[in-house]
Amino acid sequence: MQYLLEIGLEDMPAHVVTPSLRQLADKTAAFLKDQQLDFDDIKKYATPRRLALLIDGLAAKQADRAEDLRGPAKKIAQDADGNWSKAAIGFTRGQGMSVDDIEFKEVKGTEYVFLHKEVAGKGAAEILPGLVDVIKSLTFPTRMKWAQYDFEFIRPIHWIVSLLDDQVVPMKILDVQAGRETQGHRFLGHAVELQTANDYVKALRGQQVLVDPAERKAIITDQINAIASQNNWQVDLDKDLLEEVNNLVEFPTAFAGSFDAKYLDIPEIVLITSMKDNQRYFYARDQNGRMVNAFIGVRNGNGEHMDNVIAGNEKVLTARLEDAAFFYNEDQQHSIADYVARLSNVSFHDKLGSLADKMARVQTIASVLAKHFALDTQGTEDLQRAAGIYKFDLVTGMVGEFAELQGTMAAHYAQLAGENEAVVAALGEQYMPISAEGALPASEVGTLLAMADKLDTLMSFFSVDMIPSGSNDPYALRRQAYGIVRMLATHKQTLPLRQLQGELIKQLEEAGQTNGRDYRHNVDALDEFFQDRIKQLMQSNHVSHDVVDAVTATADPDVSAEISAAEVLTRAAKADDFKEHLEALTRVVRITSKNPATGDVDPQLFENDSEQQLHSAVEQLADFDGRTTAANFERLTALTPVINAYFDETMIMADDERVRDNRLRELNRLAQWITVFGDLTRVRK
């Protein structure tokens, strides 16, 4: 059997289409699996106005199954005379059976009531209406309500197609009743009734709608390549732009336009931004790699009246380029110092002072990071220079008009002003990564500037109780913390974040840059926030949950150390003797966690050889460098026989208080090295 589900909508944002289609397919597959309704394949279709699935090889019904249902114990089900109790009668009645169907089976020495039940599988037509709940469960980055309803979705739903072969499977969302009618292209097609689910792709093609995203993308690619070939151009088919354009059209037709060559004097990045980010155009270069005064767009329609389409697009682009040229020329009439001076009057946040205040804090934070990263004298000077000017482009005309160029224009204008390469690179990298898994800064100065900026943002917002909760994160604090975690992980820099916070707060207070805020407020919450991001990074690298929980069980997050510990434990867990080692080490940890003790160990109080052997072994750990390396873990696991012998021969909680405390001090000395790798009691044996 074939089943077609189509959700017809008002035009969705392009970036939502692909993930929403994938989510719908995954949740539908999970629903069918949960309902034990077999299928061969799910084909995914989408345009800006629809999300659709065509399920091939769908079973007509669930498989019949047999169930053995356990009820109350026999002693509860029957009295001494063998009469059935209310519990037994109620149990059988609830299953649509009677006490005559009861049989007794023994489970772990106790007899229980059992019913053997043959369950007929439900038909597909009976199960599929449940997909309404799947549709309602879809999540989106933004949602909206419409009409008088409280229901929220990415866009208003206008029609639903639900066809099992040639039969409508009823379902309803709000006032939209499922049927067999779908909609063609908004301007080139019309509504069409589908006779069978298999008619879907062909019927809509006849209405100028190509529902297969892969087919549309291939057509767009071929059309752009043909235009490029005809004009002897090179065109960068940026995959993200191609994906976005593909999700903006139902029937694509590519076209080429041009603009006045004088605009080529504008920096390339501005031209590219105007074309790519603002207008969704592809830019072109000649065979020597020079940008040409042309663009390629994709129309949602056929080739009719294309001259008017091209002229309209050229007019819109020219207006944007004229603005860009004006602001570019105006911006160069002022120095970087002029722009920096204006930042005192620009608010970073009404609770956190001006952008000038922020840059001053970032300079202080950057100086601390420079020492931790052992930055040389020139690098430190470059970092301080970059931190002292890096937000200046926010008050330029160009960034005021083209906000997406912030950072990029700072680097460009800094280069024009004669700043050195390290400073220029850092200014261009200050916002990186711009997405959770986006590219990281390539330069060391850029890395530390980006890290200092994000640390200031996080510490400042947390100090005034502006902490993300649930899905609410208007200032992208999770992404910024995750960026710091990724940078530290990439550079393998050992940097305990709680200790760093204390150092930064001290420096900010001494510099008089706290503006009366208590930066110690919510320090614990920020530590936990960072720890969650470290867990996120490890989980994305497929580290097992128990190891993640173990290595992150610390009050002072240290990205590099925790990742190293996770790598060591993951490798060690593959060994046959890992369980034996883990049991020995965790036994030490469990005892000491309940019985902390500090101070010197007195060998004069030893009562057996195993105490001396353990003491000697722990003494040899004196040069243990505290790092989470494989060599250090091997040194610990090598003590397994010594630890086992110690516990076999030694009563830790001796009656003699002096002896007991001495033994606990010994174990606590050992535990401090074991816990370098986290809380090993959380690792599965």
Image (cartoon, rainbow, N blue to C red):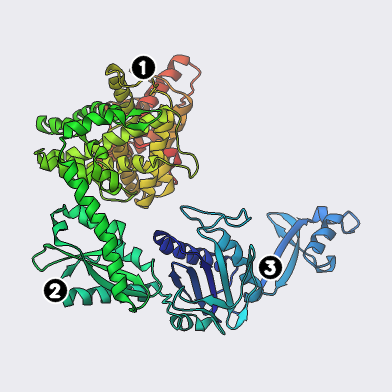
Residue corresponding to mark 3: 67
Query: Which numbered disc flags the more N-terminal residue, 2 or 1?
Result: 2
| Mark 3 burial class by Cα count in 10 Å: few <14, some 14-19, many 20+ | few
- Residue at mark 2 to residue at mark 1: CA–CA distance: 80 Å
Element on which disc 2 rests: loop
- Between 606 and 4, the one lying in front of the other is 4
Q: Residue at x 42, y 79 (%)?
A: 208
Q: Which mark's residue is nearer the viewer, 2 or 3? A: 2
Element on which disc 3 rests: strand
Query: Which numbered disc flags the more N-terminal residue, 2 or 3?
Result: 3
* Residue 93: % across, % down: 82, 63
Vertically, is 65 above or below 364? below
Residue corresponding to mark 2: 232
Element on which disc 1 rests: loop
- Residue at mark 2 to residue at mark 3: CA–CA distance: 71 Å
Q: Amino acid at mark 2?
A: Asn
Q: Identify the mark at residue 599; answer none if there is no mark.
A: 1
Q: Amino acid at mark 3?
A: Glu
* Residue 317: % across, % down: 26, 60
Position of 72 with respect to 422 (left or right) is right
